[in-house]
Each structure stands twice: as C-alpha cells, then as structure tokens.
Image (cartoon, rainbow, N blue to C red):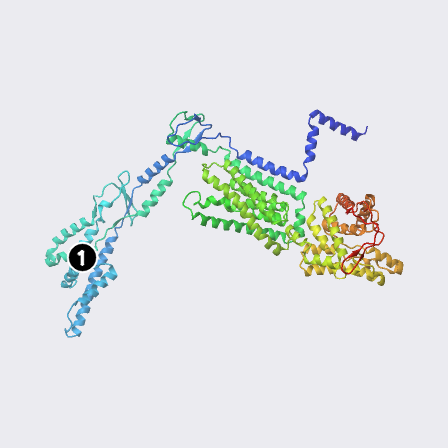
C-alpha cells in the first residue's frame, strides 16, 4: 500500500473515530464560494440579534389605579430619574432666584439736563419773539398761539416732554428766569438722589422674600427684603409738593402749581425690573439642578400581586422597561462593526465568485452610473420626506400628523433595485452596504434605521432575477414591500419605545407602500439611464430580439438562408451560455444580428444561393474579400440603426481573425502556396473579447458545418463540434475570451445535445417517395388534377 493510500485510510479512520467526519466533509464541500457569501450574511443577521437581544424579561404595562396581576421584582440594581420630583426641584430652584432690579444713580443728571434744556430753549424763544416784535413796530402780538404751539412742539421733539399751557405761561411770566431754574434744579436734584420706582407694589420677591438691587454704575448687587428706602412716583410727588411749599417765598405763589406740574413731568424712575437677567438666572438655576435619582436594589419588590397601581410604581415600571444594562452601548457599537466587517467579507467573496471588476472595467461609465443612481436615490429620499411633511399637515390626529412617522415611506431601495436591473445583484449588494451606511449617517439615524435600510436594499438586490417583462419589476416592488414589513416588525421587537398599536400598524403599511414607490421610481429612471449610459438591459435585449424588428425582417426577406442560420446559431449559443452561467439572452440576440451585413449582397453567401454560384466567376482572393466584407458592412449597418455598442463589438468579433479556409485552399490549388499571403484571407478581427462572443464564434461555425452532415448520428455530431472547437483553440481565437478548458467541454456537450435533437431521425411517410417529382399538376385557376394511382389518405404528417 502506498503512502498516499495510507494517508487516505488514516484520514478515513479519523473521520470514523469522530463519528461525524463524513458529514463534516460533505458540509465543507457544500460551502462553495458563492454559498459562503450567503452564509456570511446569515451570520451577520444572527450576530446582530445576539448583540441587540436584551436578557431582561418582558415588563407588563399598567395604568394608575389598575390591579396588579403578579408580583414584580427588579432583576438588577436599577436607578432612574424621578421626573416628577426632579421637576418639583427645578421649580423650587427657579422660585429661589431673587428678581433683579437695576438702579441707575446717574439718571438724575439726565433729568436735570432736561430741566436746563427747557429753560435755555425758553430764553431763546423770548429773544426771538421780542426781536420780531421790534422789527415790525409792535404790529405783531407778542407770544401768539401759533408761536406757543411751535415752542411746545420743539420741546416735545427734542426732550419727549409735553408741556401744558399752564406751565408755559408761568415760565413766560418769569421770562425763564435763571433764578427760578436754579431753585427748581435744586428741588429736582434732591428728589432724584432717592431711589425711585414707578410703583412699589410691583416689586417681586423670591420664595425667601428677597430681591436684588443692582447698581448699574458700580455693578454692585444688594440683596434686600424690604422697600422702605424706595419711593414710588406718588411718594415723590408728595415730596416735591413739600419742597415747593418751602420755596414759595422765592417766586410768585400763583405759579407754584405750574412748577409742581413741571417737576412731576421731569421725574422718572431710576429703578426698573430686569426681566431678561432674571429669566437668564432662573434658566441657569433650572439647568444646574441635579435630577432626583431613585435607587432600586436587585430583587426589590416593585409591585405585589393584587396591589392597586400608584403613580410611583408606574414610574418604576417605565424605568425597568427603558433599562439598558452596562453592555447596551457596547452592544450597539459591536453590532454596527459586525455588520460592516461581515458585509465587507460578503462583498469580497461575491467579487471572487462573480467578476464585478470585469464589469467595471468593461464599461467605463459604470462608476459614473453608480454615482448618478446614488444621487438620484438621495433626491428620492428627500422628495418623499418633503411630501411626507406636506401630508402630515393634512391630518390633526396622531400618528398621521407627525412627519417623523413617515420615515418608513421613504423608498431607500430604489437605487439597489435600479442597479440590480441595470448591472447585476452583486454590484447592487456592494452599493446597498455603502448606501445604507452613508444614508443612516446623513439622517442621524440609529441602528434600527440602518437595519431597515440595509434589509430593504438587500431585498432589492435579490428579488429580481430577470427583467424581461414590466411585470417583473412590479413583483419586485411588492417583494421589497413585504421585506420592509418584516424588517419593521423586527425593528419594533428591538425597540425600547412605548408600544403604540396605531403607530406601528401605520409603519408597517408605509413599508409596503415604500416598495411600491421604489418600483415606480425605478421604472421611471431605468429608461433614462439606459439612454444616458448606453446600457444594454434585459428588457432592451428583449426588444432587440423581437423577430419583427426592422433589421431582422429585412434579413428574413433578403437573406432567408442567413436568417435561418442565425436562428439556429442563436439556439446553440443561448443553450451553451446558459450552461456556463453567462448572459444567455445577450448571446441569443447577438446571434440574430451577427450576420446582418449579409443583407447587402445575400447572393454571395451559399446559404442564400439558388442554383447559380457567383463565386464560380470570381477568383478565390476576390471571393474571400467579398465574404470577409460582411463583417464591416454588418458593423456599419448596425451602427446606422443605432444598435448598442456591445452588439457592434460582437459583430466584428464573431469571426475573430480566422482564415477563410475554403477559398484559401482553392487559391493554393490555383496559384500555389509560395505566391499567397495567408493574412490576405483572414478576417480583420479582433478576436472574441468575452465568453459570449467566443461562444457565438463556435456556434456560428458549428451550425454552418452541421449542414454538411448527411448521417447525423451523435458520434458524428460530437466529432464535428470537437473539431470546430479544437480548430478555434489551436488558431488561438479563444485566448482573449476568458473561457476555461472546463467551460469549453460544457459548451461542446451542450451543442452536441442541441444538434442531436435538431437532426434526429423521423419515420418515413407512407406512400411518399420524395426522391421522385410530384405527379400532381396545377392549373392556373388553382385546381389540381390527380394522376397518381396511390394517394395518402391517412393524413399522416
């Protein structure tokens, strides 16, 4: 026994010893790279649930006055903020703030200056009046009503003081005497040395009966409990009367009342309530108040069975429901990191299983397309948010009147759905993760929102496998809606928010509508993207593959042999491409158009000839040029009809740089090998640049060669297919197509199977000999005369 066999047996023995080695081996073999991606995604979901799941038991909800149905203990040491006690403490702190009153001792100078201004303006007025009177030879009455009104208005405009006629008359009688001015200034100054407030009854006190008097000049603050040293305006008026009565011997007694009126007009309060400063201090006091923290020890009984529920117990239950254990914050952080890492691993495995990078390299516009879709998705999100705000204004009841309740209506999946249809689901998955992370950051979302957005996008990436009918995208929209609904239910289970039945049902309905909006928006944007970025989607291919299209109809009419050849080649190529998981729809459509250049001169090609062969009159070199020219003519015709770039490329690649062997061999016989350049008989290329293009090259050659088979048994067909593939391989036509040897074997078996089905034998038709001409003759009026002795009446077809 060899070492290798010993090792093998040893391994088997280990497996038997473990008792499950065979099962493990089978499981490991089943973990192919493409399935590993799904396992990784499943692991991300499981890890999310493990980290987010709270070990706390469910807490029943009670209202004040209800009777408890069980005894509830705190499962952990718990502390919570007593909102009612905290609010009471804050109110107490607010009321403890002493109101602030500003005292301005410098205001007396302002009041005195007003007095001085009145007398100075008065003296100027007298001088002006007397000057006018003398100039007019006393014809003008001194101090007429118009002039007095002008003087009153001047004082009002400059000092904002409205003098009465009584005051002005008294001042005019004294001719605004400086002596009277000095007396009144003294009285006014003595009054304004006191603290004056408009009304002592408006003074506010804090809960301790205090207020603060703040000297504006020195910024000194004095805490006061009484207002005995403060005068109200009424008290100041009494003080003024007392002072004026003592000065009556210094001026005419009849003017005492007028002077009193003047002084009352000039006196203003020098103490005022500072509402702004008081409010700021109260707000600061409230903000700096420490909350009332209630401690509940582990296993402490919160409610006993049969107790009537109190407000305090409701608070304790609410605290228990909102409780987050010490690992809560780290659980959320670990969850996000887990999803991110596993998501990146998921994308990495997908990219190895499916060549995403090839897609990006093959179409330079793809990255620009992804940016375009991303921006469109964000605009869609914003548009629906604006509409949601508008909708919420139409309602007055909750939850419909709250714009934030419409979050689940936003079609986050529209971008992923569009990318799935336009590119593939693998690129859509990569986009989904990036879009979900960036969007949740942009909207300041939390973990639950991230889970919902990601689930919606991933559903869009997997819910549509083909897009060959408009109904496919409608089904996708409903699937996304259903996944959204399931995600919302999952989010509700994770949420610590108070459960509101109406609100949650509203959210679930919005989730379904979000999927529908996503397919509507995707349907609108896909045709635009197809046009802008020259993408070839499955639906576009279905349109091009319609045999009633203009080019295909022209091919069928002008070159029926080529049309039939193209149809058979499309069947061969499509089946082979399906077997290697390629783009079978694309290769089928490409096969219909690959020989479209033959419509310009169909008689050149043998499948379209009827008796006369034009090549009998041409040299082999000219015949080869005519045959080769159909590639460039096909390219020009396709370009003229605005066929997609991918189809143009496959038209020029389907012959690669192969030699037109028939005419090359014929030329050798006529001209000799030494005088010929083999390159003159080669197609211009390029060689096939994709698997689909290479498969079409093989299918084209296999279909043409299969017409030469007289006895189509399976071994003959297999030899033919193998020979064609071998010839392409040896001529290095497949070197740039990325086809593997295993895939070539799969392609060969597929084409053999299809050709065998096409060329299988049929039973003979009784009474018919197709090698002999028909004995029926047909007259011009479409009546037939039967001359055959035997006719088939069995209806056998």
- Total marks drawn? 1
Pointer 1 local density, CA inside 10 Å: few below 14, some 14–19, many at least 20: many
Tell me, yes or no, if residue 112 can be seen here.
yes
* Image point (64%, 42%), residue name: 348
Quadrant of residue 456 within the rendered picture = top right
* Image point (21%, 53%), residue name: 267
* 176 vs 582: above or below: below
* 734 vs 485: above or below: below
Quadrant of residue 92 within the rendered picture = top left
The x and y percentages for residue 795 are 77, 47
* Image point (60%, 50%), residue name: 370
Compared across the picture, whether 219 is left or right of 581 comes to: left
Quadrant of residue 280 within the rendered picture = top left
Tell me, yes or no, if residue 363 can be seen here.
no
Q: Secondary structure at mark 1?
A: helix
Q: Nearer the viewer, residue 353 or 232?
A: 353
Compared across the picture, whether 552 is left or right of 514 comes to: right
Compared across the picture, whether 735 is left or right of 278 comes to: right
The x and y percentages for residue 421 are 62, 48
Compared across the picture, whether 381 is left or right of 543 comes to: left
The x and y percentages for residue 765 are 81, 47
* 185 vs 62: above or below: below
Q: Nearer the viewer, residue 603 or 672?
A: 603
Residue identifier under label 1: 262
Q: Nearer the viewer, residue 285 or 2?
A: 2
């Amino acid at each position: 026994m060899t070492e290798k066999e010993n090792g093998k047996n040893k391994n088997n023995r280990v497996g038997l010893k473990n008792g499950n080695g065979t099962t493990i081996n089978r499981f490991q073999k089943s973990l192919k790279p493409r399935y590993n991606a799904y396992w990784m995604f499943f692991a991300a979901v499981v890890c999310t649930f493990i980290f987010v799941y709270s070990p706390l038991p469910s807490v029943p909800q009670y209202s004040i006055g209800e009777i408890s149905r069980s005894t509830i203990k705190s499962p952990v040491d718990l502390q919570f903020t007593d909102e009612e006690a905290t609010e009471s403490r804050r109110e107490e702190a607010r009321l403890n703030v002493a109101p602030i009153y500003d005292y301005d001792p410098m205001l007396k100078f302002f009041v005195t200056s007003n007095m001085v201004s009145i007398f100075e303006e008065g003296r100027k007025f007298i001088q002006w009046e007397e000057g006018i009177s003398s100039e007019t030879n006393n014809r003008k009455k001194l101090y007429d009503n118009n002039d007095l009104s002008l003087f009153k208005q001047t004082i009002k405009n400059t000092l904002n003081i409205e003098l009465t006629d009584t005051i002005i008359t008294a001042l005019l009688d004294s001719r605004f005497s400086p002596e009277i001015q000095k007396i009144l200034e003294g009285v006014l100054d003595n009054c304004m040395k006191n603290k004056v407030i408009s009304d002592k009854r408006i003074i506010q006190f804090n809960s301790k009966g205090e207020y603060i008097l703040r000297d504006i000049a020195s910024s000194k603050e004095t805490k006061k409990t009484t207002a005995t040293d403060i005068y109200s305006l009424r008290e100041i008026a009494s003080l003024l009367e007392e002072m004026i009565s003592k000065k009556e011997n210094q001026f005419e007694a009849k003017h005492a009342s007028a002077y009193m009126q003047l002084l009352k007009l000039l006196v203003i309060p020098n103490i005022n309530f500072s509402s702004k400063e008081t409010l700021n201090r109260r707000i600061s006091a409230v903000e700096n108040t420490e909350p009332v923290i209630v401690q509940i020890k582990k296993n402490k009984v919160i409610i006993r069975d049969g107790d009537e529920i109190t407000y305090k117990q409701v608070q304790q239950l609410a605290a228990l429901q909102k409780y987050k254990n010490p690992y809560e914050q780290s659980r959320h952080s670990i969850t996000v990191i887990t999803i991110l890492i596993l998501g990146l691993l998921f994308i990495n495995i997908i990219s190895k299983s499916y060549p995403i990078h090839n897609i990006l390299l093959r179409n330079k516009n793809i990255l620009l397309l992804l940016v375009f879709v991303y921006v469109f998705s964000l605009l869609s999100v914003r548009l629906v948010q604006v509409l949601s705000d508008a909708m919420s204004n139409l309602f007055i009841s909750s939850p419909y009147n709250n714009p934030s309740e419409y979050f689940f209506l936003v079609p986050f999946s529209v971008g992923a759905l569009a990318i799935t249809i336009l590119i593939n689901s693998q690129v859509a998955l990569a986009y989904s993760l990036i879009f979900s992370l960036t969007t949740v950051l942009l909207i300041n979302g939390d973990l639950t929102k991230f889970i919902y957005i990601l689930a919606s996008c991933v559903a869009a990436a997997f819910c549509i496998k083909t897009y060959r009918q408009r109904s496919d995208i409608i089904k996708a929209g409903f699937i996304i809606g259903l996944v959204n609904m399931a995600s919302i239910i999952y989010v509700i289970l994770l949420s610590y928010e108070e459960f509101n039945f109406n609100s949650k049902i509203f959210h679930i309905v919005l989730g379904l509508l979000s999927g529908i909006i996503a397919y509507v928006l995707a349907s609108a944007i896909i045709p635009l993207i197809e046009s802008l970025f020259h993408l070839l989607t499955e639906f576009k291919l279905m349109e091009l593959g319609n045999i009633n299209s203009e080019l295909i109809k022209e091919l069928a009419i002008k070159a029926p042999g080529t049309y039939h050849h193209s149809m058979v080649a499309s069947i061969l190529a499509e089946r082979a491409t399906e077997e290697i998981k390629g783009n079978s729809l694309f290769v089928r459509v490409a096969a219909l158009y690959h020989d479209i250049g033959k419509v310009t001169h169909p008689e050149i090609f043998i499948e379209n000839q009827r008796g006369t062969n034009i090549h009998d009159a041409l040299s082999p070199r000219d015949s080869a040029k005519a045959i080769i020219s159909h590639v460039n003519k096909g390219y020009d015709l396709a370009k003229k009809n605005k066929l997609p770039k991918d189809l143009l490329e496959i038209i020029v690649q389907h012959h690669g740089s192969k030699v037109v062997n028939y005419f090359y061999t014929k030329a050798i016989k006529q001209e000799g090998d030494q005088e010929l350049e083999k390159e003159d008989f080669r197609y211009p290329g390029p060689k096939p640049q994709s698997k689909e293009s290479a498969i079409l090259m093989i299918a084209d050659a296999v279909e043409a060669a299969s017409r030469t088979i007289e006895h189509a048994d399976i071994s003959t067909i297999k030899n033919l297919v193998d020979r064609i593939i071998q010839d392409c391989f040896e001529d290095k036509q497949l070197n740039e197509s990325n086809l593997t040897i295993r895939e070539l074997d799969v392609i060969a078996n597929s084409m053999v199977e299809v050709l065998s089905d096409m060329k299988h034998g049929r039973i003979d038709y009784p009474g018919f000999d197709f090698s002999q001409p028909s004995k029926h003759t047909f007259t011009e009026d479409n009546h037939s005369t039967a001359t055959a002795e035997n006719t088939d009446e069995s209806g056998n077809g």
